[in-house]
Amino acid sequence: MTEEQKPLRRIRSFVVRAGRMTEGQQRAMDENWPKYGLELKDGMIDYAAVFGRDAPVVLEIGFGMGDSLIEMARRAPEKDFIGIEVHPPGVGRLLSRVAEEGLTNIRVYCDDAVEVLAQCIPDASLDTLQLFFPDPWHKKRHHKRRIVQPEFAQKIRQKLSVGGCFHMATDWENYAEHMMEVMSAAEGYRNHAGEGQYSPQPEWRPVTKFQKRGERLGHGVWDLMFERIA
């Protein structure tokens, strides 16, 4: 195989962090995955079959340890939530809390979000897609690893319903500026707050662990909300 024939290796926006699952997290995974877990291999999702109803669907990429996703699902029982996370301890902890609280409006993938979007999420089906405090890849040579890129913006638009929202948040000013540049140039979107403007943090977005850490370090927080208009 020549260099020209080799498939291009996709640049990943994440690194699976080291860290063992606790016994409780592993038990939660074993006991609750059959009920709340979703599998990439199962292909395109039928929301009504999974949740037993038709409701607006919110998808969150990279929910960490799951605290804010749990809180949002608890506060908005009229919506269904799907979380995607590559870090197994976070998935285990989320499953433990979902079971403890008896929440019926959360399901979870433990997989690469780009693959889940491509293989499992129907086009024009999401009410909201959330990306809160993604890895900022703050070194300039790593900026190509940032998940918010022009191609990704269009993959997201394809999955949002018209009128649906792509909601981002970061505590890195440079990444906020990068997100604003990418999304302002992206076809088919409108900035909720007006051209070039950041949105105030909505009251329904909980303050996350990453946000608290950033604020302790003196970082600001920037929310961006872009609506699919075409």
Image (cartoon, rainbow, N blue to C red):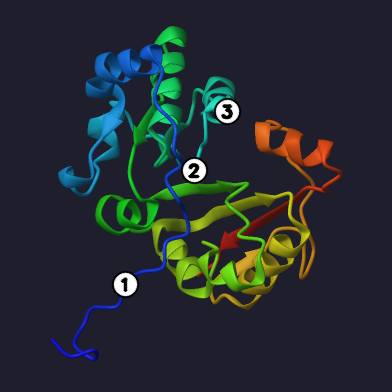
State the residue position of label 3.
72
Q: Is residue 205 visible?
A: no
Give whichever of 41, 229 is nearer the camera.
41
Identify the residue at image location x=39%, y=20%.
Answer: 95
| 92 lies left or right of 215 | left
Amino acid found under the numbered disc labelled 2: Gly
- Mark 3 residue crowding within 10 angstroms, few (<14) / some (14–19) / many (20+): some
Residue 141 position by quadrant: bottom right
Amino acid found under the numbered disc labelled 3: Met
- Report the quarter where the N terminus lies: bottom left
Residue 155 position by quadrant: bottom left
Label 2, secondary structure: give it: loop
Going from the N terminus, do you reach mark 1 or mark 3 first? 1
Amino acid found under the numbered disc labelled 1: Arg
Real-space Cα distance between discs 2 and 1? 22 Å
- In the rendered view, tell whether residue 179 sits above or below residue 87: below
Q: Position of residue 175 (x, y in %)?
A: 69, 62
Identify the residue at image location x=42%, y=28%.
Answer: 89
